[in-house]
Image (spheres, rainbow, N blue to C red):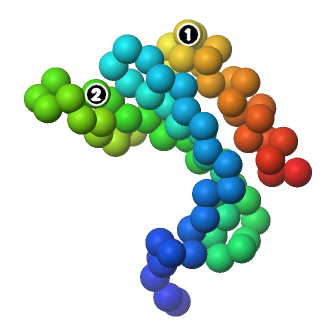
Amino acid sequence: MAGFDKSLDVEVFGKEAQFETSKIRVSVMSYNEGRPKLQISRENLSNDDGSWRWSKLGRMTKEEAQEVLPIFEEALKEME
């Protein structure tokens, strides 16, 4: 079986909600023109140099969920 080829992974939709020290991105990805899949990721603002660093999404606060829900719904429409 061949390995993952990043060049075949295409973002069909992508939008993010930004908060004070983190941002959550909702994407629809299609690998090798296959079935679109929803992806949710988080980035946290680094105190060291002010750059964004990927982090496991894990849990969301109520406020984060309320901000992300409309983006989630928009992404689902893109998957139709």
Q: Label 2 to label 1, Cα distance in Å? A: 18 Å
Task: Identify the element where label 2 is drawn.
Answer: strand
Q: Where in the figure is residue 61, as x and y percent of width and height?
A: 50, 14
Name which quarter of the figure residue 33 lies in: bottom right
Label 2 Cα crowd, 10 Å radius (few <14 / some 14-19 / many 20+):
some
- The answer to which of 29 and 3 lies nearer the viewer is 29
Residue 45's label in the rendered image is 2
* Furthest residue in direction left, as rendered: 48
Q: Residue at x 55, y 10 (%)?
A: 63
Q: Tell me the residue at 24%/35% (across/down).
A: 51
Amino acid type of disc 2? Leu
Q: Is residue 59 visible?
A: no
Residue 16, image quadrant: top right
Q: Earlier in the sequence, mark 2 or mark 1?
A: 2
Q: Nearer the viewer, mark 2 or mark 1?
A: 2
Please indicate whether residue 9 sits to the left or right of residue 52 in the image: right
The outermost residue toward the right is 80
Per the image, the residue denoted by label 1 is 63
Q: Residue 30 appears at what percent x and percent y?
A: 67, 64
Which residue is painted at 73% across and 59% down in the image? 36
Q: Secondary structure under badge 1?
A: helix
Q: Residue furthest bottom?
A: 1
Q: In the rendered view, would you say 79 is above or below 52? A: below
The picture places residue 5, in percent across and down from the top left corner, at 48, 78
Residue 27 drawn above or below residue 49: below
Q: Tag on residue 49?
A: none
